[in-house]
Image (cartoon, rainbow, N blue to C red):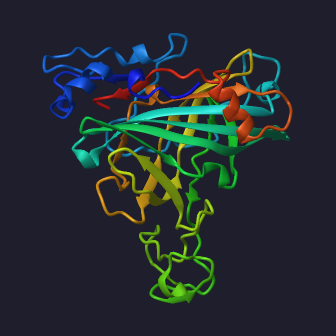
Amino acid sequence: MKRSGIGRILVICDGPVPLTRWLSPSLLALAGACSDARYDSPDASSLVDASFPTREAIPDTGQRPPIDIDDAGANEDASSSTPWHARLARHFAISIRFFGKDRGLADAALFSHEIIHLAKLDVVAGKVSMQTLRCRDHGTGLALGILGEFGWSFPEKLLPQSFELVMRADGLRTEAAPRPIGFTLEQPAGCTPGKQLAVTGRSWLPGGSCECSADELPRSARDCRIVDEDGDGNPAITIYRKGPINDPEHTRLLDRSQIVQGQLAADGSIDALFVDNYDALALNCGGISCIQNLIASCPLELNRVRFEPLSDRDWTCEDVLSEVDAGKLFPLPPLVFVNGC
């Protein structure tokens, strides 16, 4: 199943919609967007499966606060005599779909983002560790009436990430431990603020020297903590863009995102919600397309996660994506942009 572009767009509006001043008549017709007249928005619950409980929305503060993990709450499912972790498959395909807007364009840029993971679970002494590979990262944006695409260029080349999967009173969740992407949290040995170090294998550094910075997180591609995580010869990771702006971005991220409120079904699948919480900075920013931590997420109830159990064999990202593209995993819903997040 291939993405079908404009023909699958739904724009959800809330009253008089500022986007209409930028949308062309043809795009308005194709996208089903709002006219100049007032448009009554459907309730957000209409975008959520009827079988899935409505959750509390994240306040619209422009930040994505992490949900704290504590030791309170049961680690067993009281409704079953079988421990919850004993009912989990050992392999899952995971789809994460979330929505938001870029405040850097006067709230004019909306996006829909989908990530496909391959996960392997291990249970040791009742503790569940989950190792994930990011197989696909793709987003679609709508800005100034123009559609564009973006995503991680080489997600499959990144090292697997590890999480602890725990059961709390409100369901399954992952922890909010920070995960650096495209950089290291620690300074290299011998690095003190203001000093330069000679390094090899970093073609983006003029003169082969990096800078030791006192910043909490790297602010420059010259920072000695920046690494080429996806192996393409550029700093950090590369994010592609297709549309009116085609220049790639080389971006470092601190990922505190979480999967929360997961409900384990009888068939072994899990429905959950996604807390989008990235500290992202484009290191080659030269235009309006650069990511500068101005992203606001939509209400939590719209940001959906689906775990599909896989058979007990060795899976690759190629295997999973083949199933996804054939429509056997995660049937592609209409592309939705949500205005008024």
Q: Which residue is drawn at 24% across and 24% down?
A: 26
| 115 relative to 216, above or below | above
x and y percent of residue 187 in the render? 57, 76
What residue sits 39% from the left and 30% below the top?
Answer: 299
Of residue 22 and residue 13, the one placed in the foreground of this image is 22
Q: Is residue 89 left or right of residue 20?
A: right
The location of residue 39, given as percent across then percent down, is 20, 16
Q: So how many labels did they put on this image?
A: 0
The residue drawn where x is 41% and y is 13% is 46
Is residue 92 at least partly visible in the picture?
Answer: yes
- Nearest the viewer among 337 and 9 is 9
Question: In front: 210, or 66?
Answer: 210
- Snapshot quadrant of residue 34: top left
Q: Residue lying furthest top in this view?
A: 50
| Residue nearest the viewer, comparing 224 with 152 | 152
Vertical position of residue 46 compared to residue 126: above or below: above
Quarter the C terminus occupies: top left
Furthest residue in direction front, as rendered: 26
**Residue 169 shows in the view:** no
Side of 38 relative to 224 (left or right) = left
Q: Position of residue 209 (x, y in %)?
A: 52, 86
Q: Position of residue 188 (x, y in %)?
A: 61, 79
- Taking the spot 48% from the left edge, 53% from the top edge, the residue there is 239
